Image: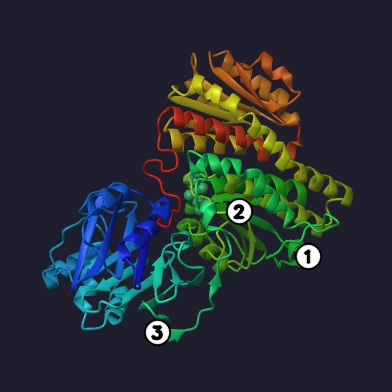
């Protein structure tokens, strides 16, 4: 997590850096700071709290500078405080660094710096070690000092560094944390992610692992771990900077909920040929390779993992290939039995999630083919995969993932249908039926969004609750995990999801008078079973909100409140049923006065373990 931005050019660095940091607040927002070259000195301003605090603190100060680095933080080592905020400097303040990642051997390095070099530490962070190391090795060449410091460090990092003795230079280095370089006219930039730079540049260098970059205002040079200069093709950004603005919505989350019909339309129609066959751009896995697959592993974190659960249903149901779904943080350390006959599917909105990336590397090292479903073009997961299938959700800014999830589902359905066709286990007629139904999803979703007001009204009756259970079966159970995560992460209500049939094996002990139970009964073939589960919790006094397809009005006899979704075949209901849950979470959080786009303790892109 954390976001870094650096600028070198002729304009006012602090304005540009702060503007860029605001676009990276999704990566962390518990403190922010800036270091600027000015009159042979490095000026540092850093404060606990949002970037707005930093802005207010420096307002009116003469900070005009042509070069600087900035940081927005998600604390890993040391609580959010002014002193723990980045940038960090060496002892005499001649060098400043910003860092995204974790230095795993920082304790060892810190002890060594104190014992052998008498270094005095000011903060509790791992990052301060970097500043002192660079300072220790500095002998007139910042690049050399950064290289030597990097050789000492273990862990993940994207680092930006400046030195007062070289005011016209900035050095950056990356290992396992994202870093991009923006190429301007008479100015250059570094950043953790492209949106920070979109207002200024469209030409980007995507920096690879273990590369070091030296920037002046007119030149950018990239070097590999052996200090050899490397060539990099320019990546031209084509997407719209406005996509990262709220456009009149109160929050990015609600804007992104409303963008789902468009995202789903794009994700589907960009892959459909005139005859409705699917052309999986970016996927080169052959028919023969699909036929020979023993197993599919789907690995991801958080919401993307929940999309993977639906992916399992789809691939097993359509293509008849066994699928294991696992959270990446577990997969990476359990020595999985994956091999060259396995397909590993990584799902990630950001494409930078540390655990997902590590799991992907583990799968590759065992010979598995790696396919990724990713939203951010050119991200690390995308670049390290054999095949990439992009979700066309557009930039997702709110920490709570919504449109990334539904477009991930669409991708998983398309991959599953493609596999089924290639394996010859689905008839053309059945296949065309699914495609026809998928095409109807965006319009059906618009219909759900038109009932937003009713969900808002429902939220008014529910927002004071402090405990919620989500239950469902099959696909609905997977969607209930996502509904529950949405609610807890933005409203801080203690929310728990469980397969409805499992409830009676323990968790039902927690159901008492007025306990809120949101019961998903969106599949016809499990509808009656769900009615029984609703009765079980009603018998213990629960207050039940049911979710069902239009026409399944029987649920009104059991549930206290009902949300309907349009008619849809059972296998595809997750594309619709999650949306009322997203809306409910949003309005409950809003009524509770929560900071919806930036929930406490979270960050959009989890680039640390
Ligand atoms: O960028 P990714 O899709 O890899 O991120 C995975 C999770 O960190 C993410 O989905 C997280 O759970 C969201 N906050 C959920 O809304």
Left or right placement of residue 224 versus residue 544 in this view: left
The structure residue drawn at horizontal position 23% and vertical position 72%, both measured from the top left corner, is 133
Left or right placement of residue 104 versus residue 470 in this view: left
Question: Could you give the CA–CA distance between mark 2 and mark 1, rounded to whole angstroms?
Answer: 20 Å
Q: Position of residue 100 (x, y in %)?
A: 36, 61
Secondary structure of residue under mark 3: loop
Q: Position of residue 249 (x, y in %)?
A: 51, 40
Asked if the residue at label 1 sits under 8 Å from ligand 1, the reply is no
Which residue position holds label 2?
298
**In front: 156, or 399?**
399
**In front: 20, or 346?**
20
Which residue position holds label 1?
287
Are the two marked residues, 1 and 3, in contact with CB atoms closer than 8 angstroms?
A: no
The structure residue drawn at horizontal position 27% and vertical position 72%, both measured from the top left corner, is 162
Question: Could you give the CA–CA distance between mark 1 and mark 3, rounded to whole angstroms?
Answer: 41 Å
**In front: 145, or 165?**
165
Q: Earlier in the sequence, mark 1 or mark 3?
A: 3
**Dot 3, how many residues are within 10 Å of its Cα: few (below 14), some (14-19), or many (20+)?**
few
Q: Earlier in the sequence, mark 2 or mark 3?
A: 3
Q: Quadrant of the N terminus?
A: bottom left
The correct choice, above or below, for 161 with respect to 144 in the image is above
The structure residue drawn at horizontal position 51% and vertical position 65%, both measured from the top left corner, is 380
Q: Nearer the viewer, mark 2 or mark 3?
A: 3
Q: Is residue 181 visible?
A: yes
**Dot 1, how many residues are within 10 Å of its Cα: few (below 14), some (14-19), or many (20+)?**
some
Left or right placement of residue 370 versus residue 196 in this view: right
Asked if the residue at label 3 sits under 8 Å from ligand 1, the reply is no
Which residue position holds label 3?
226
Q: Earlier in the sequence, mark 2 or mark 1?
A: 1
**Dot 2, how many residues are within 10 Å of its Cα: few (below 14), some (14-19), or many (20+)?**
many
Asked if the residue at label 2 sits under 8 Å from ligand 1, the reply is no
């Amino acid at each position: 997590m954390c976001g870094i931005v650096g600028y070198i050019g002729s304009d006012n660095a602090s304005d540009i850096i702060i503007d860029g940091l605001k676009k990276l607040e999704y990566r962390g927002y518990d403190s922010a700071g800036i270091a600027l070259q000015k009159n042979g000195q490095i000026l540092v301003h850093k404060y606990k709290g949002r970037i707005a605090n930093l802005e207010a603190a420096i307002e009116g100060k003469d900070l005009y500078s042509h070069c600087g680095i900035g940081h927005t933080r998600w604390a890993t080592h040391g609580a959010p405080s002014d002193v723990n905020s980045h940038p960090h400097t060496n002892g005499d303040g001649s060098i400043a660094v910003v860092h995204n990642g974790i230095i795993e051997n920082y304790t060892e390095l810190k002890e060594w710096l104190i014992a052998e070099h008498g270094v005095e530490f000011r903060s509790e962070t791992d990052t301060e070690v970097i500043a002192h190391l660079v300072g220790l090795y500095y002998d007139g060449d910042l690049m050399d000092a950064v290289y030597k410091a990097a050789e000492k460090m273990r862990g993940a990092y994207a680092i930006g560094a400046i030195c007062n003795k070289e005011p016209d230079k900035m050095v950056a280095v990356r290992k396992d944390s994202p870093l991009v370089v923006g190429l301007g006219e008479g100015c250059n930039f570094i950043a953790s992610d492209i949106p920070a730079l979109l207002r200024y540049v469209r030409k980007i260098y995507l920096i690879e692992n273990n590369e070091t970059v030296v920037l002046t205002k007119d030149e950018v040079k990239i070097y590999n771990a052996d200090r050899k200069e490397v060539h990099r093709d320019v990546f031209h950004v084509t997407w719209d900077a406005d996509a990262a603005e709220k456009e009149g919505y109160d929050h990015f989350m609600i804007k992104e909920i409303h963008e789902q019909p468009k995202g789903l339309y794009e994700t589907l129609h960009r892959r459909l040929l005139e005859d409705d066959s699917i052309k999986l751009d970016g996927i080169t896995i052959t028919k023969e390779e699909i036929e020979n697959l023993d197993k599919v592993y789907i690995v991801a974190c958080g919401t993307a993992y929940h999309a993977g659960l639906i992916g399992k249903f789809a691939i097993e149901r359509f293509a008849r290939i066994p699928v294991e779904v696992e959270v990446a943080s577990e997969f990476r350390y359990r020595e999985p039995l994956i091999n060259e006959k396995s397909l590993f599917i990584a799902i990630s909105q950001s494409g930078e999630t540390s655990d997902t990336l590590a799991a992907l590397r583990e799968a590759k090292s065992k010979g598995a083919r790696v396919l990724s479903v990713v939203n951010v073009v050119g991200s690390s997961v995308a670049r390290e995969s054999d095949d990439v299938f992009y979700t066309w959700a557009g930039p997702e800014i709110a920490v709570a993932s919504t449109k990334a999830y539904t477009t991930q589902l669409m991708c998983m359905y398309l991959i599953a249908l493609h596999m089924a066709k290639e394996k010859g286990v689905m008839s053309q007629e059945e296949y065309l039926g699914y495609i026809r139904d998928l095409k109807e999803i965006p319009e059906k979703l618009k219909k759900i969004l038109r009932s937003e007001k009713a969900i808002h009204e429902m939220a008014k009756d529910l927002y004071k609750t402090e405990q919620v259970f989500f239950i469902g079966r099959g696909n609905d159970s997977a969607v209930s995990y996502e509904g529950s995560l949405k609610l807890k992460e933005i409203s801080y209500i203690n929310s728990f999801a469980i397969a409805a049939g499992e409830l009676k094996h323990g968790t039902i002990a927690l159901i008492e008078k007025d306990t809120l139970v949101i019961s998903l009964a969106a599949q016809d073939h499990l509808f009656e079973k769900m009615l029984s589960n609703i009765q079980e919790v009603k018998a213990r006094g629960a207050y039940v909100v049911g979710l069902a397809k239009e026409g399944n009005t029987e649920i009104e006899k059991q549930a206290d409140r009902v949300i309907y979704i349009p008619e849809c075949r059972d296998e595809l209901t997750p594309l619709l049923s999650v949306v009322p849950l997203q809306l409910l979470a949003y309005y409950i959080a809003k009524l509770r006065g929560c900071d919806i786009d930036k929930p406490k303790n979270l960050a959009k892109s989890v680039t640390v373990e």
